[in-house]
Amino acid sequence: MPASSLESIVSLSKRRGIIFPSSAIYGGLGSTWDYGPLGVELKNNVKRAWWRSVVHERDDMEGLDAAILMNRLVWKYSGHEATFSDPMTDCRVCRARPRADHLFLAQKGREPKGLPEINAAIAARELKCPKCGSTDLTEARPFNLMFKTTVGAVDTGDESALAYLRPETAQGIFVNFGNVLDTMRRKLPFGIAQIGKAFRNEITPGNFTFRTREFEQMEIEYFVKPGEDEAAHQAWIDARTAWYHDLGLRPENLRQREQEKHELAHYAKRCVDLEYRFPMGWSELEGIANRTDFDLLAHSRGPSNPDSLEELRYFDPEQKKHIVPYVIEPSAGADRATLAFLCDAYEEALVKEPPEAETAKLKELVGSFARSVEKRDKLDPDVKARLLASAAAIEAGLPGTLPALLGLGDDPEANRIEVFKKVRGVADKLGEEFTRTVLRLDPRLAPISAAVFPLKKNEPRLVELARSIKRDLQAEGIHTVYDDTGAIGKLYRRQDEIGTPYCLTVDFQSLEDGTVTVRDRDTMAQQRAGRGELAALVKPKRRAPR
Ligand code: ATP
């Protein structure tokens, strides 16, 4: 079972150097995160896998790395200055400022058709403040999501120096369409891929790295002749779905969702979202849209755009005339993909059964925790029901449910119940000995590919051999670490938690015959292998599907 709560991923990430809250020593900055030593490896592997698949392994794609700061006119003609906004309303009673479209969806059970429909509902007092319940809400107004900055040494105070941090990487591709077409002598169909930071002043960031104000996108603009757009669109939907499957995302946790007519941008012909079943529910991982000729036309010189210096079009040698290509846009988030891979790979498992007496003691404690929850009259009824259901399922299934009990340890509501401290004390102790957390990441994504340990750190010959094996593997381009900071069992657990597919232990037999013990993360099976075989064995490759 993949992670059942985001808290377990947040806590593992913090504990093991994957993702930290940003600027924590100054109290942090809401919803901003820093990728730590292992997180940067993981995210880089995700980005590399994407680049390899959509640029290197295809014959119809080019790469690009455009600037974050662009001429402001880009955002004028793309439509972002006028329309890239969320509708906000203010509660006149408690001063909360919720997103009005979210209120509409949550309280009326469907997406609103537009701002007028939202405002009609507000005027009819049909929407309530999510904080205080009042229906005294102001008319919803659009709030632009672009971050503003100024360019140049002097802040003139007027708008001449105004620039935006790009809210998407796509526009950098459109304005370079002509450059890539000419310099690479491309014929349609062809595409341009780009990975880079994007910034949105999101009103409701949250769910860890799922929605942040600074994030990284992996975007493709694929240019085709009009008429060939629908087939190309479907091919990209299939290819992108296959990419997630190939990297180990469980098929039952990934789905394609066809956007409904009223959700589509006015210029889009069709859009399919790839959604992942995150612990908080099905949510967008990637959007794949047929944007027709909207973007290239918008940036082309003409009556509606006197500022552009170019016409973004293509000379079709067959028709012997200029045409404006259609564009298919598979637009993914590097952070969301990384989070999905983390959630999907996360597993807490029982490795052996604790003694019966220990299990019985734990059962009794979980029972008294449930009784204590039951007695709490002031507890929110939903929280109460959730805690009682978890406790009942855990109590019935112990010791097999010990990992679930450890997961409950990340739940702040459970921790508010006094007796849970005792439950945790016993569970944590048993967890140390009888369970393990393992990240079953595809080896091509794992932050570290192999870890080498000497059986004894005060035995120089073992240390030297282990270190030289690490150097051998590193020379083969395999990211390998050396570690001697604990007993072998502890070192295995640590590597399991960060998803290292192989651990290699150098022992006294290694000194005699040159073989080492290779331990597999997923099966925990151990085999001996000669030094010369190691690189082929541990080189990152595709795992058989789970
Ligand atoms: P959402 O509906 O979740 O706000 P969106 O439809 O606005 O997303 P797009 O503009 O299509 O998103 O951006 C493409 C991709 O960029 C998304 O599928 C997502 O993976 C990523 N992305 C967008 N906004 C954010 C964000 N605030 N934080 C992290 N990733 C994001």
Image (cartoon, grey):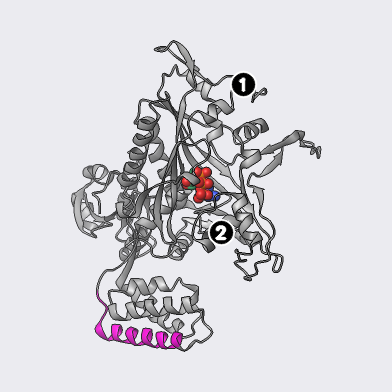
Measured in 3D between alpha carbons, the distance from the residue under mark 1 to the one under mark 2, in whole angstroms, is: 40 Å
Asked if residue 372 lies in the magenta stretch, the reply is: yes
Badge 2: few (under 14), some or many (20 or more) residues near its Cα, within 10 Å? Answer: many
Identify whether 270 is placed above or below 543: above
Q: Which mark is residue 272?
A: none
Q: Quadrant of the C terminus?
A: bottom left
Q: Earlier in the sequence, mark 1 or mark 2?
A: 2
Magenta span covers which residues?
A: 353-374
Amino acid of disc 2: Phe
Identify whether 77 is placed above or below 214: above
Classified by dominant secondary structure, the portion drawn in magenta counts as: helix
Say if residue 383 shows up in the picture. yes
Q: Position of residue 406 (x, y in %)?
A: 38, 73
Say if residue 414 shows up in the picture. no
Q: Position of residue 86 (x, y in %)?
A: 61, 50
At 32% across and 73% down in the image, what residue appears?
433
Q: Quadrant of the N terminus?
A: bottom left
Badge 2 is on which residue? 104
**Left/right of residue 253 with respect to residue 83 in the rendered view:** left
**Left/right of residue 26 with respect to residue 493 in the rendered view:** right
Asked if residue 369 lies in the magenta stretch, the reply is: yes
Q: Which mark is residue 301?
A: 1
In what element is the residue under mark 2?
Answer: helix
User: 458 or 437: nearer the eye?
Assistant: 437
Q: Position of residue 134 (x, y in %)?
A: 65, 69
User: 195 or 173: nearer the eye?
Assistant: 173
User: 143 or 55: nearer the eye?
Assistant: 143
At 21% across and 58% down in the image, what residue appears?
526
